Image: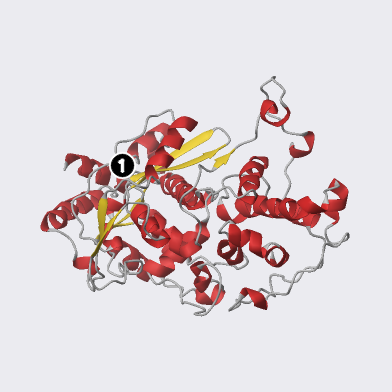
Amino acid sequence: MEDIICTCRNALANIHLLDAVYASMFLYECDVPMMHYFCESWCPKTNTILTVAGETSISLWDIRTLTGLPITGILYDEFVPTAFELTGSKDGKQCLPPSCSSYVTFEEWCRFWFRGPKKYSTTSLPQVEKDFSALRTSKPWNDFVHEAFVILDIPEEHRMDTYLAGFLTCWLCAFVLPLKDLGCIRPSVFKPASLLVSGKRISLFISVLTCIYKGLGELSSSFTPRKQVEHFPAHYIYAWLARYFRSHRMGVHDFVGAPLIAFYGTDAIKTLARKEAKSSICSGLDINWVIIAPNDTISVKYVDDSMQSQQVTDFFLSMRSCFLTLRYDNNCIAEPYSPHRFSRQFGFHQYVPGELKPPPEKITRQYLCSLLQTSVRLGTHSSFVIPARGLKMNLRVTDNYTSWWKSTYSSSVNSLNLPSPPKSSEGRRSKSQKRKADNTPLYDKAAKATRDS
């Protein structure tokens, strides 16, 4: 990792990934009780947390301010190209060489591309630097350390791009989008990694939030969540909980890289008791509503004329309700993104929210591209206001919302009073009977109440 940052620092900066890559050098620990009640309160139909104080969620602006990943760009499209795309053959089959038919672990991949000595271990972790110049300077290509170039017979002029593409392949699989085959390289990642190296801008943090929403939905809907394998970048959720529910201490205050680094290390966790963690999440009283709200003392009106700063543009796009997109292999994912349900996080008053029209059951790549274009479209000449920072954001709710949410949340909580498990004398219920009995979770009642309103 350090060798990549030293060798390819300028290249990573040019594709706006230097801060995010540096942040992946560090370990981020989970506050287990907080994560437990976070997942219990998660509603996969609205992708929000249901608390007594209202709904809250992970927003695009949260991902942007935590990771520094770019919001605009082309669709993250992860798949193995066909033989025609690679070789011009018209047989239409996917061109996957025999060497990719078996799994390649991260350790094997890194050992192939970098054969130098290990600098860090589980007991010796890297320290946060105040400047990238503090990292050791890169050395010329070494035929032993970088023997892969000799084995693959890569010309000198292509070594930098090849090395960076090899690293980004591993980085995307391990840290950014651990979608499947955890701990192993996915051949389908070669294409987006190569596009990034070529200078193509990919909408990575939309893909990251889609992956998080999808993973949380599967986890919260599972009948056996303890056995559910995480297929999403949970470290971003740990940092989000640290921001909004103060589950972590801020370990460092002066550093380079993505803001995510502020919450790294085992010493950062406060480790609340289960009762305290449940109260913090479920009550919503500890939510830090102003953590990402603008710092302006007055409200400012803007026009989407493609002339605004990148920060204002990203904030504007983060406020837009839409469907987030992700495609890998033959899976086309579209997750609802509803910032109008947690508008206090952006500094607005909370009204009774509407509901997004669900996408069709069969989603094509063309439909995903149209959803992405809608979510990142600029130059609409629509006006928008970034409100002034408020001190008591939890009180920025309308009377209609207060009464509506009180009724909605009460009915949602009551729906969790499931029947007791049957005694042995009554026999065991079938899986289908259990599914029917347990199929009225908190999020179903909340979604129904939203439609009825």
User: Does residue 36 appear left or right of residue 414 in this picture?
Assistant: right
Report if residue 58 is visible in the image.
no
Q: Which residue is identified by label 1?
A: 440
The residue nearer to you, when weighing 352 against 346, is 346
Quarter the N terminus occupies: bottom right
The 10 Å Cα crowd at callout 1, few under 14, some 14 to 19, many 20 or more, is some
Report if residue 417 is visible in the image.
yes
> Which quadrant of the view contains residue 14?
bottom right
Task: Residue at 38%, 54% (x, y): give it.
Answer: 40
User: Does residue 131 appear left or right of residue 347 in this picture?
Assistant: right
Helix, strand or loop at label 1? It is loop
The residue nearer to you, when weighing 142 against 111, is 142
User: Does residue 124 appear left or right of residue 335 in this picture?
Assistant: right
The residue nearer to you, when weighing 387 against 55, is 387
Identity of the amino acid at label 1? Thr
Residue 136 image position (x, y, % from top left): 73, 75
Task: Residue at 25%, 49% (x, y): give it.
Answer: 412
**Residue 378 in the image: above or below residue 64:** above
